[in-house]
Image: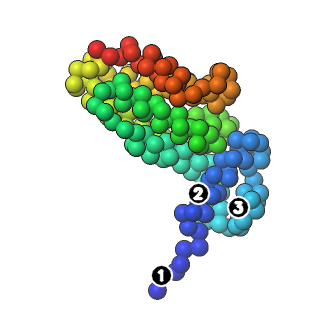
Amino acid sequence: MARPRVHDEALRVRLLDRAGELLSADGPEALSLRRLATDVGTSTTAVYSLFGGKPGLVRELYVEGFTRLGRRLDGAARTGDPITDLVALGHAYRHGALANRHLYAIMFGRAVPDFTPDEQALEQSVRHMRALRTVIDRGIADGALIDAPTAEIAYAAWGLVHGLVSLELSGSAPRTDDARYERALRNGLAGWRR
């Protein structure tokens, strides 16, 4: 008979969410494994068993953030019009960042100054952005977007969305709603239309 799993996926997700919240609210010094385990109602043994320690936990926060973002992007509606589809991806990105703001700083900032994602984690993060490349590839092939390297358009589109979202999350921009965000996206993406 197989041994039952003590530390399941639900516990893993609770630990990741709480760790992200601690980092987001109080910085890296607040992220102690003992405090995390206590806050979630488990043992430090569970944290070590699931993540191997603090560096593994931070790495998994990074990967989990991109996994959640990738699910949002993959679920965005597609119409066949590349600009409309890129705007839909932009909305999915924004809503994902707002829903997981406690992971966003780990994904794109220096929430943990000594953390550098390893090569495998970086590959996983880029893989979760495949929806963006797919829409751009289709738009170029159909002649709806300018004939430029996919990576160039993806970089510019991602930079636009990331910039808008980062300004909103930091409170550096006036309050944003979906309509205002969409206008900014459409204006920013218009230069890529053929």
Q: Position of residue 142 (x, y in %)?
A: 22, 25
Give me the C-alpha separation between circle 1 and circle 2.
Answer: 23 Å
Q: Position of residue 147 (x, y in %)?
A: 27, 17
Q: Amino acid type of disc 2?
A: Val
Q: Are marks 2 and 3 in contact (CB under 8 Å)?
A: no
Q: Residues within 10 Å of mark 2 (few under 14, many from 20)?
A: few
Where disc 3 sits, the SS reads helix
The residue sitting at 65% across, 21% down in the picture is 174
Q: Amino acid type of disc 3?
A: Val
- Horizontal side of 191 relative to 92 (left or right) equals left
Q: Residues within 10 Å of mark 3 (few under 14, many from 20)?
A: some
Image disc number at residue 13: 2
Circle 1 sits on which residue? 2
Circle 3 sits on which residue? 40
Q: Amino acid type of disc 1?
A: Ala
The residue sitting at 48% across, 33% down in the picture is 91
